[in-house]
Image (cartoon, grey):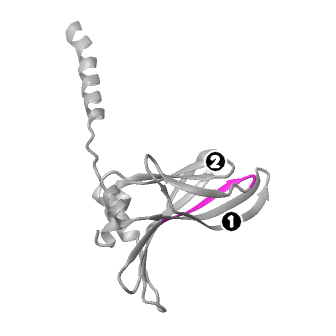
């Protein structure tokens, strides 16, 4: 090979890599979408005939070594009206944080509800604390975000913010179970 070709070859390779990175096309694996749809639980209430759709749980680690476990829940009542919410369990060490608000990243503050706060066992690393939260979302919002995914920042009185991320694949699979 000539020395000129050896000099140009790395530049061509870099150009190909950079052009691939510049692509804004998002590819969704059909396997991921199908897995989310298959893992979504459907439960019918025997008392009021409402139907609840519980999406699969997402596990991740957030700010300050916080364990995050979150999913989507939709409830269709007997008159056909559907309500949607993001539900999460937030587990961390050393002092109750008291999560109190939620905001869509680059968007509006959304209705937030603290469902439960608990103190757990203590060990050599400190005491474990946990909170369960619920965040109201609209159907229109979820259908729109199937194209991009979305993030929700959940903030505490102690100043700690954690982000819940719902991917395109998760939303597409989950909403397909609801026919959306």
**Label placed on residue 160:** 2
Q: How far separated are the C-alphas under marks 2 and 1?
A: 16 Å
- Neighbor class of circle 1 (other Cα within 10 Å; few <14, some 14-19, many 20+) is some
Q: Residue at x 40, y 71 (%)?
A: 40
On residue 117, which mark appears? 1
- The answer to whether 104 appears left or right of 95 in the picture is left
Q: Is residue 131 above or below residue 17?
A: below
Q: Measured from the top left, where is residue 140 in percent x and y?
A: 33, 63
Q: Quadrant of the N terminus?
A: top left
Location of residue 16 in the rendering, given as x and y in whole percent from the top left corner: 24, 28
Q: Which image quarter holds the C terminus?
A: bottom left
Q: Position of residue 8 (x, y in %)?
A: 23, 14
Q: Is residue 165 visible?
A: yes
Does residue 30 belong to the magenta stretch?
no
Q: Nearer the viewer, residue 80 or 13?
A: 80
Residue 151 badge: none
* Image: 52 above or below 139: below
Horizontal relation, residue 47 to residue 68: left or right: left
Q: Which residues are magenta?
A: 86-95
47 on left or right of 62: left
Q: Earlier in the sequence, mark 2 or mark 1?
A: 1
Query: Which of the 4 image quadrants contains residue 176?
Result: bottom left
Residue most toward the bottom?
Answer: 47
Residue 113 in which image quadrant: bottom right
Q: Is residue 57 visible?
A: no
Above or below residue 18? Residue 52 is: below
Residue at x 27% of width, y 40% of height? 24
Residue 71 locus on image (x, y percent): 48, 64
Number of dots carrying numbers: 2
- Asked which secondary structure carries label 1, the reply is strand
């Amino acid at each position: 090979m000539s020395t000129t070709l050896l000099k140009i070859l790395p530049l061509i390779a870099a150009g190909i890599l950079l052009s691939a990175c510049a692509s804004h096309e998002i590819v969704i694996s059909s396997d991921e979408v199908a897995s989310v749809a298959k893992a979504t639980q459907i439960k019918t209430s025997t008392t009021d005939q409402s139907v609840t759709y519980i999406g699969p749980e997402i596990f991740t680690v957030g700010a300050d070594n916080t364990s995050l476990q979150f999913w989507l829940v939709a409830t269709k009542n007997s008159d056909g009206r559907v309500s949607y919410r993001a539900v999460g369990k937030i587990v961390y060490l050393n002092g109750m944080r008291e999560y109190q608000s939620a905001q869509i990243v680059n968007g509006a503050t959304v209705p937030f509800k603290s469902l439960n706060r608990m103190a757990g066992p203590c060990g050599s690393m400190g005491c474990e604390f946990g909170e369960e939260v619920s965040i109201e979302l609209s159907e229109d919002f979820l259908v729109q975000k199937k194209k991009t995914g979305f993030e929700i920042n959940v903030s505490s009185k102690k100043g700690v913010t954690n982000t819940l991320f719902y991917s395109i694949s998760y939303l597409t699979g989950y909403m397909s179970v609801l026919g959306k």
